[in-house]
Each structure stands twice: as structure tokens, then as C-alpha cells.
Image (spheres, helix red, strand yellow):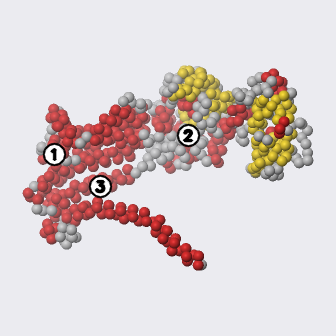
Amino acid sequence: MTELSMRRPASRSVRIWHLLPKISGTVFALLIAVVWLGPILLMVMTSIKSNADFLAGPFSLPTSPTFKPYVDVWSGLGFDHLLWNSLVYASLGSALAVLLGLVPAFALARFPVPGKKLIFGVLLTGLMLPQQTVLIPLYDTLRAMHLLDTRIGLIIVHGVYGMPMQVLALRAFMTTIPREIEKAAHLEGASDWQVFWQMILPLSLPGILVGYTLNFIAIWKEFVFGLVFLNSEANFPLTVGMLKLNSDRYISVFNLPAAGLVISQIPIAILFLLMYRKLSGGNFVGAVKG
Amino acid sequence: MAAVELVNVDKRFGGHQVIAKLNLDIADGEFAVLVGPSGCGKSTTLQMVAGLESISGGQLLIGGRDVTDLPPKDRDISMVFQSYALFPHMTVRDNIAYGLKLRKVPKDDIARQVGEVAQRLQIDKFLDRLPKALSGGQRQRVALARAVVRRPGVFLMDEPLSNLDAKLRVEARSFLVKMHHELRTTTIYVTHDQAEAMTMGSKVVVMNEGVIQQAAAPLTVYNAPVNRFVAGFIGSPAMNFIELDYADGHVIDIGCKIRLAVPEPARAALDRRAPSRVVMGVRPEHIHAVARGEHSPAASETRWTVDVTQHLGHGTLLDIRTGPHHAVARAGADDDSRDGEERSFSIDMDKVHFFDVTSGANLILNS
């Protein structure tokens, strides 16, 4: 009994000492979460306040929440049109990037391609190039092709610009597909094309979805290409259209830009929630081993 | 069905030769087992037959047709992989039917053939499941069904049982043998498990370092191994090797009081070569503990110390030693040897093998 009572405090302190890294890690993660979530929370709070309410207390909770800023900014900026344009650019631009990336990714993952290292170097360079460095050549190319200020022009730009990342990401994913599946398909009588179409492509679906989603988000947020290559308001994506929020009309109102920003982020949040389950792995379970 | 012939087959990876001048005939309907330690070239040989690895030199004939440079799909073969290699995004039904669909077999025929094979392999209840919803044994049967349904000329099997637990493996082993008896399809089966090789194959091909050591019926390989490698690889526990002097028709180690008479015809064969030393190979079942107080009639008795006794239930393994020599003897289930005890053991000298000390060749077979 004495021994036990003597041991207890020691074991408790040991336990606390043992848990310390976990506790400090959790506290640190919470701090990071607050830093990240703080501005978002502030934006949402501002978007449901009246302007007077905001000026009275920018960081306080809304006294009488209202969705009027959403209605005002929606009609003022023509959000339906902007959202549609962004949806077209993001969905088709990402689809083009994935399509352009699939076959090179398969070739690099599975075949002895001559100059593989050089190709990787070029692809990586494509990833690292700042947008500004390609603006002038792209502008010239689009002008030569009579695609300036057209939706299809911007879709092609997004597709080509997103392709290097798709090749690298898809190649990395395809190398994880067990080779025995391809061998088995070949033995069953499949050609290289059939192996690609019937095995690699369906098995790469999680990788394709990841690549597509990331590219979609990148295009949704993209601003410079839209600003430089488009002139007509009818073709503007959300990011360029929201420039109007910097105009005199909105400069002294804070709730309308906040509402606009919230609206612009909702599709991305929905996309992520829809894709989240599909993005988690487990696609090859049952393919190999017991 | 089809015979398989490998004629002077070479395989090089870069400058490294892994298979050299391999010659092997597998008759139509035969169940040949390629067995050997890891890295011996057995899987590479199978992959070359499958067409998944190119052949660096030589010729491969299937059904008398030169298929050396043909792609896998034109070789009239099917293969079961160690990892099963099922298509994870397809149902069991689609997995089995895949090859038939590619060959544009009419839909009704596909449905009938898949149904028949699934029933035979007892997977007809799982046809609409994905592979991930199956157990290891069921997946293995799906892989078999996919191989069987096309009725190819040759089955290739690359350690198909190695992912199963011990109980399931024994069941699957007899199931595969039964299936072979029914279909009589030429089968090449790769394993590193000598028990599988012995129990399943009508021909056992023992390989080491890219070279076929012996290709013969299982009992021939067991009872008449051509060299020390085959003798040591086939059989469990492995054959005991004891290096001794040879003189006057006896194998001798004076220090250990070993003097065993070599019976005919082995003696004549050894006398022709007149080696001064030999490696005597004795299987554990040919070393017998002599009952205490008795003597074996033949002059084959020696004194050994029992190091460890291992009771297996159906028998007992005795680790024994005398001087520098160690051996394992297989005794009856009721053996009462004690660890550390010194007792007499007799050796069936009619059953022992003699190998060359340097080359390891069987001196009796190769005389």
C-alpha cells in the first residue's frame, strides 16, 4: 500500500511528461487553425452585417444578421454570369489539362522513353515558370490564332498551362498501379491501347480526380490570364469580374465585397466536399495478394 | 494442350547473364514444377515462356510452333500470378470473362463458359462481387478461373499458393492437382517450396543459378539426386552431408570411430573413381536410433550424442553430432532419447548417396 501510494505521483508526472508533446502539438495545430479560419470567419461575419453594423464593430458578432449584401452584390456584379464563366473555364480547362497529361504520363510511367530526364526537366521548368514570363508569348500566340478575348482561347491557355502538373501527378499515380495487372491483361490478349483504356484509365481515376480538382481550384482562383487575354465583360471570369468591387461604388462598403468573396468560394467548397470521398485511396484493394 | 520446348534459351539483363543455355522439354499434358531457391531463374524462365520477358537467345516452342518472338496473347497460354493480379475495378464475372470478350466470343457463350468455370471452382456465388470483397482463397480461385476459362494450351503458374495460409495451401494444392487430372492441360508451375514440387508435379525441374540441375519425376529427384544441391534442396528435413575418408570399400573417420562398409554397387562405382574423400548424403529417415542394449546386425552402427529432440507428434527429429559431424535423424513418435544422451545409431547404407567433395556430383549416378 505504501509502495503504491509512493509510486502514484511519480507515474502521474511521467504520464504528463509523456503527453506533453501531444498536448503542445494539439495547441499548435489549434493556433494554426485559428490563424487560417480567423479571416474566413471575419469575412462571413462581415457579409451578413449591414454596413453600419460593420462600422460600429468590425470584429463583433452581427447584431441583426441580413442576407441583403448577397442579393445586392449578386445583382450589382452579375454574379450568375461570372460564376458560369468561371465554371466553364475551370471545368473545361482542367479537363483539357488532364486529357493532355494522360498519355504522356502513361508513357513516362511504363515505357523506356528516350530522354526521360530531359522531359522531366522541361515539365518541371513549366511548373516553376512564373505566369508573368509566359504572358507575352501566349498573348502573341493567341493573337496569331485569333483567339484573344475568346472563351476557347482562355480554356486552351489553362489546359496547356496545367498540363505539366497533370503529367507529373498522373505519372506518379500510375507507377503505383501494380504491374501484374497490366501483365495479366496482356496475357489475356489486350493490346497496349486496351491496357491503357481498360485498366490504367479506370484505375487512375482517383489520381485523375485529384489532378482535376487541384487544377479546377487553380483556374477558379486564376486572375492574370483572364485579365490580360480578355477584354469583353461577357467573357470575364469571377476573379476579373470582382475587380469592380474595387470601384468607387464599393470602396466604402465592406459587407458587399465580403458577400462577393463568400459566393466565389462556395463552389470550391462544394467541389472539395463532393470529391473528398473519391480522393481517398483504396482503389487497388483486391488486385494483388491475399 | 501443347508441349513446351526450351532450346538453348539465354536471358541477359544488361551484361548480366541470368539464364544460360537452358534446355527443357515439357510433354503435352505434363505438370512440370520449376523449383529452386530465390534468384535461381525459375520465375524468369516462366516469364520468358509467358512472353512477359524477352528471350535473349535460343528458341521457345509451344505445340511445335516457334513462339520466341510472339507477344503473350499469341502464345496460347494463360497465367496465374503470385499476387493473383485480378482487375480490381471489375467484378469477378468480368475478370473471368475478360479474355473471352477480347477474343470477341459471343455473349451467350461467354455467360455459359463463365458460369461453368465458376461453378467448378465454387465461386459462382461471388460473380457480381469486386475482388476486394473476397478472401485470399476466393481471389486465388478467381485468378484460376480466369486462366482456365479460355482453355489455353499451357497454364503458367507463378507461386500461386504462396499468399495463402498453411491450411488453405494444402487444400488448394490438392485442388490444383485434381483440376489438372480433369483438364490434362500442360502446366508449368513455379515454386520455391519443395513440398509443393514433390506433391504436385509429374516432372520436377530443380534450378540453381540459372541452370537446370535435374529434371525428372519427383521420386527420381528424391531417390537419385544428380548432385549435392538437388539432394539438399529436395526433402525436409534436408539430407545430411557427412564428409569422410574412403578406403577399402569403407567410409571412415577414425577420430569419431566411424567405419561404415559401402555396399555394392556403390562400392564398385566408388572404386572406379578411387576418391580419397567423399561426402556421404543420408536422409534423416535412414538414420535409426538403435534400441538401448541392442546392436544393429550390419556394421553400420556409430555412437552419436543427441543435442536436441523435437517431438512432432507423428515422429521425432533428433539433432545428433559426433566430432565435427552434425546430422538430423527421424525417429518414431515414441522415441525416448534425452538431450545430451549418447547412443548408437545405424545408417541404411543401401540408401546413402556419395558426392564429389569439390563438384558435388553424385559419384554413383555419374560413374
What is the spatial separation of the Cα atoms under label 1 and label 3, in whole angstroms? Answer: 26 Å
In this view, the residue in front, B176 or B344, is: B344
Q: Amino acid at mark 1?
A: Leu
In this view, the residue in front, B169 or A223, is: A223
Q: Nearer the observer, disc 2 or disc 1?
A: 1
Q: Are marks 3 and 2 in contact (CB under 8 Å)?
A: no
- The residue at the far left in this view is A248
Residue where numbered disc 3 is placed: A270
Identify which residue is drawn at 34% across, 51% down.
A275
Place residue B208 in its image quadrant: top right
Chain bearing tag 1 is A
Residue B318: where, in percent of width, then height?
Answer: 77, 46
Residue A228: where, in percent of width, then height?
Answer: 15, 43
- Which numbered disc covers residue B82? 2
What is the spatial separation of the Cα atoms under label 3 and label 2, in whole angstroms? Answer: 43 Å
Q: Nearer the observer, disc 1 or disc 3?
A: 1
Chain bearing tag 3 is A
Q: Amino acid at mark 3?
A: Ile
Label 2 crowd (10 A; few <14 / some 14-19 / many >=20): many
